[in-house]
Amino acid sequence: MKMYEWEASFEAYVQRLMDDFQVPGAIIAVAKDGELTYEKAFGYRDREMHTPIDLDTVFGIGSITKSFTCMAIMQLQEKGKLSVHDPVITYLPEFRTPDEAQTKSITIHHFMTHTLGFPPLPSLIPAMLPSLQADSTAEELLQHFEAQCKHSIDTFEDLMAYIEKLPFELLGPAGTEFSYSNEAFGLLGAIIERVSGKTYEAYVQEHILQPLGMERTIFHVEELGEDDNATMLYTPRMNDGAREVVRAPGWWDAPSMRAAGFLKSSARDMLRYADVYRTGGLSNGERIISGDSASQMTAPHVRIDLSRSYGYGLGVFPFTQDYTLFTHTGGLKGMTAQMFIVPEAGVTGILLTNMDDAPISNLTLGLLNSMFGRPLETQFATFSECEVPLAYLQQCPGTYKSGEGDAVEIRLDEAKKQLVLIQGSEVFPLHSVGEDTFLFTRHSIDSLIRFVRHPDGEIKRLALGSRQLPKAI
């Protein structure tokens, strides 16, 4: 592999971030036109044992699993077994939402684009309950969600029954509001199972992993047998005001939500997988999905914010004037991952770490900027600041909370006529960049938030990251 002039400065930047965030291990790999052009491992797969990381080391990929789930749906559509525009209740007659008319109008497309109208719900925690109870590092999480964890959600039927009993307000008619939904993707697994007659895991194994030669991509590390080339898991926590990263063995699992985020894979396998999106459906000499299906998966079906859109299980972002980025991140205890494809440049990349809350956006952006000759810290997108009347700012303050446990507070600094966002102990000034949209910077990465109004003009929710958080009354 030839050396690139950007490697030294990029690797110094990665090392600095890894040290700052105490990330035990990572691997970054890039291919051009399907050929590996860059790979670099940092740190260790097991910090205490000093065991190295290579292209075949298995890491968790979390929500990157969602694109595999959508790929399976596209394959079933190609076989005439379903259409993405079919109502979900055709396949899941027991699926219910708080509104019967809405239940009937939600399609598979709405599940695949997170536009079914669900706010973030607490189901993922009870879905992972048995593995959380077996994990001493999860005690605090279990205490926080104690009320939701009376029973575990073990099956798709349990998940639908749980959603049916949950009191929540829909965000809007199906197709109108984007808010990331693990429940929708968990239940896409149920649709795949009922339509194909195979378990979700067996379907993915047979129709995606095997044809692609992804021999190190699995749902359970036990499938590796004697082979121990998989990462130890680490999690950051606060100890007397200081951040420490602790060893946290034990992979979390959720049988009813596997389709939302529980695959594990290696850098080599993931480059092979990413190639399907670079080529429009081909990889490893096999056609995995049709060109048309690949186009549907990577089409910007719905806007997330001023710069980002979402396809089917993939983010679709503009990157410079000439390039588009297809991407997804994944995070769960002991893992933070990001996959990206820049189709116009023939580039695919994967970044895998063995700690949750690793600075994956910084690492990915630094890599892309390095490869495309831009200064390391250039943002994904830039926005011009605009003036907002004080009367408008006065409507925004409040606490916004999600069922997944996230809470942010918005306050108004009257003297500076500026809103601030408070998350935990961190305080971020907000800068207006568009209608109802503000920008803040965390860990040198710009993020957008948007206040969402009721038709009567009252602010009801806050769209932050990829989720809408309802305003607490």
Image: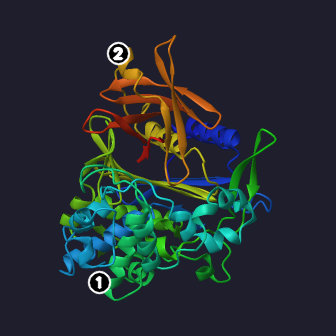
- Residue 207 in percent (x, y) is at 35, 80
Give the quarter of the image for residue 167: bottom left
- Left/right placement of residue 17 relative to residue 80 reads right
Point 37% across, 27% down: residue: 382
Instruction: Characterize the local packing of mark 2: few (<14), some (14-19) or many (20 or more) Cα atoms within 10 angstroms.
Output: few
Q: Nearer the viewer, mark 1 or mark 2?
A: 2
Amino acid of disc 2: Pro
- Helix, strand or loop at mark 2: loop
Give the quarter of the image for residue 206: bottom left
- Residue 399 in percent (x, y) is at 51, 37
- Can residue 380 be seen at all in this image of the molecule? no
Residue 248 to residue 419: above or below: below
Point 69% across, 70% down: residue: 133
Q: Nearer the viewer, residue 463 or 444?
A: 463
Instruction: Characterize the local packing of mark 1: few (<14), some (14-19) or many (20 or more) Cα atoms within 10 angstroms.
Output: few
**Would you say the residues marked 1 and 2 are in contact, meaning their CB atoms lie under 8 Å apart?**
no
Residue at the spot of label 1: 195
Image mark for residue 389: 2
- Residue 344 in percent (x, y) is at 27, 48
Give the quarter of the image for residue 457: top left
